[in-house]
């Protein structure tokens, strides 16, 4: 059975003047291996759906039809990963708004710190340099101080 959700969701979003928020929580990474490690599944279908939905942006550019976001999980989602994600988004349409979301430790990842302000700002600059025109940092109230991985039991080289 093939699901036609992206087309149906796209039509409903255009008709209702809503926004299709494509969280990179579902497409946490461009790297399929890292995505499987974080989410347990491949990201290929999500990336394909995002590409299909991006084709509909001209139907309704304002308010934004499609928004992308990435959860900045410390130690997993770094500037290199954001660069790859941003280049992918930019290749589809550099006007797609991109939110970089601060991470807050919970559930299985309670041992990680919150996203640092410096990490978020570096990722924002990286996404802009990759060609995205509208990059926003979300959950700014969660941003923490710089990471101190030695206090978490990691060897710092």
Image: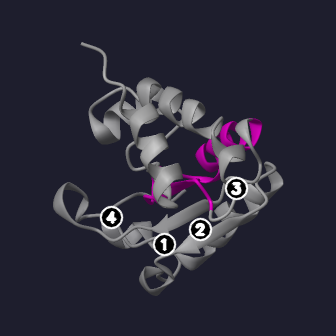
The residue stretch that appears in magenta? 64-91
Mark number, residue 6: none
- Residue 101 position, x and y percent, is 49, 66
Mark 1 and 2 residues: CB-CB less than 8 Å, in contact? yes
Q: Is residue 63 above or below residue 41?
A: below
- Residue 56 position, x and y percent, is 63, 39
What's the CA distance linking mark 3 and mark 1?
38 Å
Circle 2 crowding by C-alpha within 10 Å: few under 14, some 14–19, many from 20: many
What's the CA distance linking mark 1 and mark 4?
10 Å
Question: Which residue is farthest front?
Answer: 15
The answer to which of marks 3 and 4 sits earlier in the sequence is 3
Which residue bears the numbered disc 4? 112
Q: Is residue 75 magenta?
A: yes
Q: Is residue 40 above or below residue 139?
A: above
Mark number, residue 119: 2
Asked if residue 86 can be seen in this view, the reply is no
Dot in front, 3 or 4: 3
Dot in front, 1 or 2: 2
Q: Is residue 87 magenta?
A: yes
Which residue bears the numbered disc 3? 61
Dot in front, 3 or 2: 3
The answer to which of marks 1 and 4 sits earlier in the sequence is 4
- Residue 131 position, x and y percent, is 81, 50
What's the CA distance linking mark 3 and mark 2?
30 Å
The answer to which of marks 1 and 2 sits earlier in the sequence is 2
């Amino acid at each position: 059975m093939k699901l036609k959700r992206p087309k149906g969701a796209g039509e409903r979003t255009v008709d209702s003047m809503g926004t299709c928020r494509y969280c990179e929580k579902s497409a946490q990474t461009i790297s399929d291996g890292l995505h499987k490690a974080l989410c347990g599944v491949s990201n290929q279908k999500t990336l394909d759906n995002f590409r299909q939905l991006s084709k509909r942006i001209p139907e309704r550019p304002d308010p934004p039809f499609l928004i992308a976001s990435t959860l900045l999980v410390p130690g997993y989602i770094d500037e290199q990963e954001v660069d790859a994600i941003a280049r992918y988004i930019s290749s589809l349409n550099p006007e797609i708004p991109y939110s970089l979301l601060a991470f807050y430790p919970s559930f299985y990842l309670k041992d990680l710190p919150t996203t640092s302000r410096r990490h978020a700002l570096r990722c924002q600059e990286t996404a802009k340099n990759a060609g995205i025109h509208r990059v926003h940092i979300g959950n700014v109230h969660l941003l923490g101080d710089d990471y101190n991985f030695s206090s978490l039991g990691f060897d710092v080289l």
